[in-house]
Image (cartoon, rainbow, N blue to C red):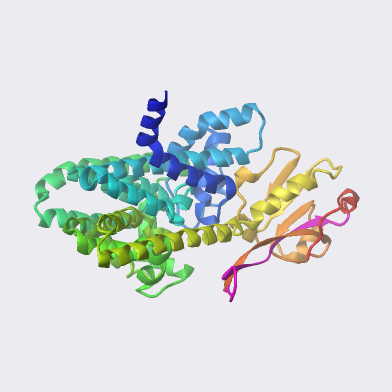
Amino acid sequence: MASKSCQIARQYGYDLLLGSIAAFYVFAVPYTKVEESFNIQAMHDILYHQLHLDNYDHFEFPGVVPRTFIGSFLVSILASPAVLAIKLFQLPKIYGLIAVRLALGGIILSTLRFFRNQIRDKFGHQVEAFFVILTAVQFHLLFYCTRALPNVLALGVVNLAYGYWFRGNFYAALNCLIFTTLVFRCDMLLLLCPIALELLLTKSISLWEAIKYCTGIALLSIGLTILVDSIMWKKLMWPEFEVLWFNSVLNRSSEWGTHSFHWYFTSALPRLLLAAYPLFMLGVLLDRRVLFFVLPVFSFISLYSKLPHKELRFIISSVPMFNLSAAVAASRIYNNRKKTLWKLLNFIMLGLILISLGCTIIMFLASYGNYPSGHALKGLHQMGRLANTNKWWVHIDAFSAMNGISRFCENDYPWRYSKEEEITLDEFRHRNFTYLISEHSSVDGFKCLFSVYGFSRARLQLGFPPIILVKEPKVYIHGYTRIKDIMQINWPGCS
């Protein structure tokens, strides 16, 4: 029995470590933001409304650009047994949100395992171990791997592409990148092209064979997404083509903010990689094999930098490859740690890993306070049910809907919810809402019952701790003053 346990630990120990950290993030911060809203609402509707398409959220709130349902279907299928049990035991739907996020995380970490196995075969067990360590002390990859972003769905397929690339199955790697480009994220074209060009220049593939092997998957991917999404959107639809048109041709993504050309290299990558950032650059110098794999990914970020609208999640697919390069450097430093110069490098490396761990803890604490409306609705459910009324009708404003509340957070009857937009503050007193969840501290006709603080900024100080996370009231819960039962409850009050 002991030997069997040791064998399981050797085979799945790394998966248990990374999976446990990702699962901790899910249970600690179950709520979602606006970037995840389409896929999260789609998963909710697939699991709870099923064939009743008219009840699906995306018809009322379609978003700026359409997205595919294919990823949501896959995750929902995997989460459906857990959601069925949740329904049978009549548990709140928030447990369904946890189920779909764990299912998504399982998919992403399984593809990362596939890539990691190829790292072990090509670079050895020690490089694999450092790859896991560096991934574990980073915040964003394990935090995001359970979040239903199109970028994360694309990451799963990109991990497969990396694994096939390492294995020498170059056409399979290209097929994976073609599929994720046409279905999940059209911007993966910026990763596909450098990898394909490098394979052509090194004569790893031939142009004719690439066309022959990749045309089929391209047509299949387009056909699949048009078939599925045209049904779900009730009109002819290829989502990623519309996204490409919106972002690249119309260049309207810049309406959501712009950054300088160097932002990915000077801000996003240092936060994504932490200790792995300087180590990955060293890895390229220490092992010439690494350059072959890192150069196309580096080119991907350079090409992406030309687009003015930038977000950290856009380049999350680069993290596994950069972590590999960093792991190669860390392994070389560790093996030579008894030599004079390398001893200093080993000491610096250990310090960087500890700093990464500290930064990850700080980022987690900040992220915990980044979903105030989710906590607000949970608190309202706990206290608002004490009021003796036939129904509780909650209005959720746009800010709250974007910062923690999804359909999974809603309770069944007698609770009812509205996300109606463009209601003026003066108009609320003439509507029959029981409660308001709002970014506004005061609304005529309503009393502020309690507020929820959210992360505002980090502040440096002399002393311990050196970094203070400043929180401010972000969301306010109001009750209708004409309902006496609400006014009689002992609410915490607003500060």
Residue 363, position as x, y percentages in the image: 52, 60
* Spot occupied by residue 450 in the image (x, y as percentages of width and height): 77, 58
Query: Toward the viewer: 252 or 481?
Result: 481
**Residue 478 horizontal/vertical position (percent):** 78, 58
Q: Is residue 248 visible?
A: no
* Side of 29 where 13 appears, left or right: left
Part of the protein shown in magenta = 460-482
Question: Where, quadrant-wise, is the N terminus in this rendering?
Answer: top left
Question: Closest to the observer: 330 or 57?
Answer: 330
Give the left or right position of residue 141, taking residue 306 as reference.
right
Q: Residue at x 61, y 45 (%)?
A: 407
Residue nearest the observer in this picture, 112 or 212: 112
Q: Using the image, determine if residue 401 lies above or below residue 386.
A: below
Residue drawn where x is 54% and y is 31% of the image: 82
Does residue 417 belong to the magenta stretch? no
Residue 112 in the image, given as x and y percentages of width and height: 35, 44
Q: Quadrant of residue 226?
A: top left
Residue 173: quadrant of the picture: top left
Q: Quadrant of residue 494?
A: bottom right
- Main SS of residues in magenta: strand
Depth check, front residue: 5 or 311: 5
Q: Quadrant of the C terminus?
A: bottom right
- 56 left or right of 393 in image: left
Q: Residue at x 76, y 45 (%)?
A: 382
Asked if residue 474 lies in the magenta stretch, the reply is yes
